[in-house]
Amino acid sequence: MAVTIEDLYRNYGILADAKDNLSQHKDAYQVILDGVKGGPKEKRLAAQFIPKFFSSFPELADAAINAQLDLCEDEDVSIRRQAIKELPRFATGENILRVADILTQLLQTDDTAEFNQVNASLISIFKMDAKGTLGGLFSQILQGEDIVRERAIKFLSTKLKSLPEDVMTKEVEEYVFAETKKVLEDVTGEEFVLLMRIVSGLRVLQTVNGRQQLVELVVEQAFLEQALNPADPDTVDRLLQCTRQALPLFSKNVHSTRFVTYFCEHVLPNLSTLTSPVAELDIQLEVLKLLAEMSPFCGDMEKLEANLNMLFTKLLEYMPLPPEEVENGENSASEEPKLQFSYVECLLFSFHQLGKKLPDFLLDKVDAERLKDFKIRLQYFARGLQVYIRQLRVALQGKTGDALKTEENKIKVVALKITNNINVLIKDLFHNPPSYKSTVTLSWKPVQKTEAVAPKRPSNEDMGSGGSTKKQISPQPRRDARQIYNPPSGKYSASIGNFNYEQRGGFRGGRGRGFGARGNRSRGRIY
C-alpha cells in the first residue's frame, strides 16, 4: 500500500517525539524512506524528512542514501532540486566521498536552477570536509563521463579561489596539486589552461619553489625535449598555449631559460614555415612577442653564443638594406623596402636582453663584414624610424581625452610606442662598444598599475631587466582584433600586431600523454 502524506507526517511525529529513543523506531523511519515511491507531494516531504533522521539509523544508511538518490533523479525538477539541496546532510564520516562523487555527477544537468543548487551543495560539503569533497571531484575528473569531467574542472577553476583559508589549508592545497598532476597526464588544451589556473592560484605555490614546480608542469606539457614540426598546427598550438601559461610564472628567480632556448633553437629557424592554428593569427609576430616577453627572465644559457647568433641572423632578415642609388644620386625605381616595426621591436628587444649576457658578441663574435652590413641596416632603419616618429607625433599632436580613444588614434599611439622603443634600443647598439643598459616596456604590455588580484608578488618579482610587467593568469582570455596601421606616407609602413592569441577550445589529435582529444567515457550512473 502506497505511503500517504498523512503516513509521512504521523511517522515524522513519532521520530520527532522519540528524542533519545530514536533508534527504537526503525519502522517509522522505513515508512519515510518508502515515501520516495509515492506521488509528487510525498516525494517532496520524503526529501526533507529522510536526511533529518539519517544519522540515527546507521543500519539503514545505504537505503536512506539510495532513496535520496532516487529523488535526485526524479522527472520533476522541483523534487530533484529539493533532494539535491538536502544531500549535504548525508555528508558525514565515510559518506563524504560518496556524496561528493554523486554531486559531481549531478553537475551534468542542463537545468540552470538545478545546476546552481548542485554548486551550492558542493560548496556546502567543501566547508565540512574539503579533502573528502575533492576526492569525489577528482575521482570523476579522472574516471567520469566527459561532460562531468569538463564541468568538475570548471567548478574547481571558478570556486576554489573563493574558499577561505580555514577551508583551503596547506594540506588541502597540496592534495589539489598532487591530484591535478595526475589529471595533467591526459588533458585537452582547454583543460590544461583551466587546470593551470587552479594550481597557479594555490597559496602554497606562491613561492619561488612553488612557481618553479608550476613551470616544470608546463615544461612537461610543452614537449621541449622534442623537435618542432612547424607544419603541424596542433604542435604549434601546444607550444603557444604552454608558453602563455608559463609567462606569468617567470621572474628573476624563476627562469625562462628552457623556453627561450627552445625558441632560439627550434622556432626561429622555422619561423617562416610555422603553420598558424588560428586563421586570423599572425603566427610569426605572436611567436616573436612571446620570445620578447620571456627574454628578460632568461638565466644562464648553455649555448648563448649560438642562440644570440640565431637572433642576430633573424634580426637582419627584418632590417632591410637601403635601396641602391643610380648615378645622379636618386633612388632607383625599385620599390622602397617596407620597415616591419612590430617584428623588429620583438627581435631587437630579445637580442638586447640576451646581449647583456655576452656584451662582446658584436665586437668579438661577428666578423667585420657582417658587422658593417648590420650597421648599414641599422642606420637605414633608424632614418626611416625618425621620419615615421615625426609623422605619428604630428598626427597625434594636440589630441587628448576622447580624441585619443578612437580606433585610428589608439593604433597610432601603439605605433609611437613601438617606434620609440626601437629608437632607444638602436641608440644602445650604436654605442662603441655597444651598450645594453637602456630599459623599455614592450609596446603591447599594459601600463603597470595596482590590481586587486590574488597574492601580489614583490615588485622585483614582477619586473625583469627589460621592464616588462608580469600579469596574473586572467580568468577569461581576451581576443582583440588584429590591427594594421597604414602610415601617412607611402614611404614607410608597418604592421602593428595587437592580436592577443589565447587558448582555443581544445587541441585536435589523438589521446596520449599531454594534450589530445580524450576518449569518450560514457558510463552512466555509477553512484
Image (cartoon, grey):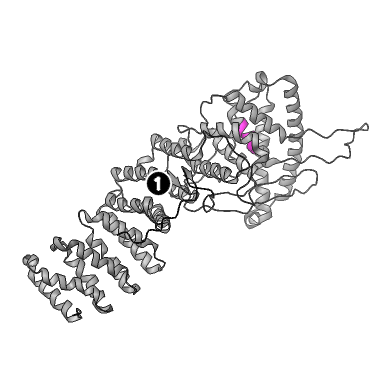
The residue drawn where x is 64% and y is 22% is 361
Query: Depth check: 272 or 339 in front?
Result: 272
Tell me if residue 61 can be seen: yes
Residue labelled with disc 1: 183
Name the spot of residue 58 as percent of width and height, x first. 14, 60
Which corner quadrant of the image does residue 402 belong to?
bottom right
**Secondary element at tag 1:** helix
Screen quadrant of the C terminus: bottom left
Vertical placement of residue 370 versus 220, above or below: above
479 lies left or right of 40: right
484 falls in the magenta region: no
Magenta residues, start to end: 345-351
Q: Looking at numbered disc 1 in the image, what kind of residue is underneath it?
A: Val
Which corner quadrant of the image does residue 447 belong to?
top right
Vertical placement of residue 491 versus 145, above or below: above
Instruction: Tell which residue pokes out farthest to the right in this image.
Output: 328
The residue drawn where x is 54% and y is 52% is 504
Name the spot of residue 208 as percent of width and height, x first. 40, 35
250 lies left or right of 265: left
Q: Magenta part mainly helix, strand or loop?
A: helix
Query: Depth check: 257 or 518 in front?
Result: 518
36 lies left or right of 465: left
Tell me if residue 438 can be seen: no
Q: How packed is label 1: few (under 14 Cα within 10 Å), some, or many (20 or more)?
A: some
29 lies left or right of 450: left
Screen quadrant of the N terminus: bottom left
Query: Depth check: 507 or 385 in front?
Result: 507
